[in-house]
Image (spheres, rainbow, N blue to C red):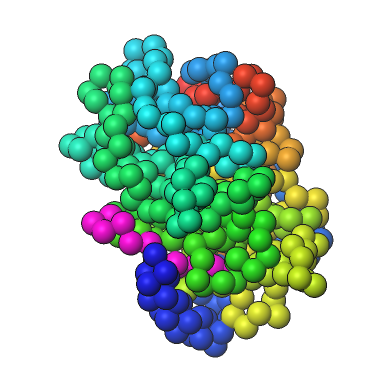
Amino acid sequence: MRARLLAATTALLSASALLAGCGGDDTGDSGSATADGIGPAPTSAPNDAPTLQVETVLDGLDHPWDVAQAPDGTLLLDERAGGFTAVLPDGTSQQVAADLDDLFATGETGQMGLVLDPAFADNRRFYTCQGSVDGGADGGPAIEVVGWTVDAGWTEATRFADPLVGEIPVNRDSGRHGGCRLRFDTDGSMLVGTGDNAIGTNPQDLDTLAGKLLRVDMATGTPTVIGYGHRNVQGVAVQPGTGRVFTAEQGSRVDDEVNLAVDGGNYGWDPVGDGVYDESVPMTDTDIPGAIEAVWSSGDPTIAVCGITFLDGEQWGAYDGLLLLGVQKDTGVLALRLDDQGALVEQFRLPELEDYGRIRTPQLGTDGALYVTTDNGEGDDQLLRVTPAA
C-alpha cells in the first residue's frame, strides 16, 4: 500500500505545480467563498418546473446509505449498521444474505457506499465501501472496498474481492469522517471518496488514503490519489454527456462544498491549526498555492450535504441536467444548475422533498426515476421513488 501511495505522490506533486500556475481557471470556479457561500443566492424552483410525484418504495429502514438499480429494475440498498435489501421489479422486497461478521460499524462508519459493476448484467458484481474490524495494516479497524457477486434470485451475496482496496484509515474511536462514496467514471475506473478521520494532518498528507478522491484500477485494485485536501467526501457524481466528476463534502463550521475534480487537485482543507483539529478554518485555504476553490459552497451555516446525482432525461423538463444534493443538517434536496463550464448558475430546493427529513442519497436509476434514501434513524427511514407527474 505504501509503495502505491509514494508512486501516486510523485504524480500529484507534478500536477499540483501545474495547478499553482493556472489558479482556478480550469476548475469551473464561479467566485470566492464568503459567509453567504459561492454563487447566486438560493431561490424558489423555476416557474416551469415539473411537479414531482413521490412514492414510498420501502419503509422501516435504519440509516440506509446507498442505492443502485440493476438492468432488470431491481433496487439494491444497504444500511449503515449492516445488511443488504433487494426490491424486485414486482415491488416485493427481500433480505440478501451476506457475511458481514467483520463489519466495523461505529458512529459515521459502517456499511456505506454501494455501486454496481458497469458489466453487472454479465458478471453480477457489485462493490461496497465499509468498515472492517481487522482491515488495518496492524490488524485493527480500517475501511475497505469489497467486491461481491449476487445470485440471479437476489438471495445471497458472496465476496470475490476481499478487499479490492484495503487499509483506508478509519477513526477507530468514533468512526468520524469515514467517507465513503463509490462511483464509476466513463473509463470504467472506480472513484472512491474518503474522509479525513477527523485527523488534521490527513487531508494534505499524500502518504495516506484519508481525505482523498481515489481512482481504482479494477484489474489490480491499485488506488491512485487524484484529489487531496478533502474533509469528508460523501458525494461523487459523473455528469452525463461531459464525463466531468463532481464531489460533495461536509464542511466544518462553514462551507459545505461541491467541487469539480481535477487530477492532482488540492482542495485546500488544512485543519491542523495549533496541532489540533481546528474546525473553524475555511474549507478551502486560499493561502495554499494552487488550492482549488469550490463550484458551490454553503457558507455559514452549513447544511451537511451528502450524496449527489445528476438528473438526466427529457422527462425531467426544466429539471433536466440538475445536480441534486442530499441535505442532512437541514432537510430535503438542494438542486444546483451548472453552466457548460461547470460553474454555478442557480440553486433551489425541490419543494416536494422538504417533508421527508434528512436525505442521505439521491440517485438516478437506470429507469430514469430518482431514488432517495432518508437518514432519520430509529427505524423510520424510507426508500423513495421520485418522478415527474404525468
> Quadrant of the rendered structure where residue 6 is?
bottom left
**Is residue 278 visible in this depiction of the protein?**
yes
Q: Is residue 219 magenta?
A: yes
Seen as rendered, the residue at the extreme left is: 122
Residue 379 left/right relative to 68:
right
Q: Quadrant of the N terminus?
A: bottom left
Q: Is residue 73 visible?
A: no
| Quarter where residue 205 is shown | bottom right
Left or right of 318? Residue 312 is: left
Q: Quadrant of residue 232?
A: bottom right
- Image location of residue 269, percent across then percent down: 66, 67
- Identified at 53% across, 56% down, the residue is 169
- Picture residue at 67% right of the left edge, 21% below the top: 378
Q: Where is residue 289? Give x, y as percent.
A: 62, 83
Was residue 77 drawn as part of the magenta stretch in this picture? no
Start-end of magenta stretch:
218-229
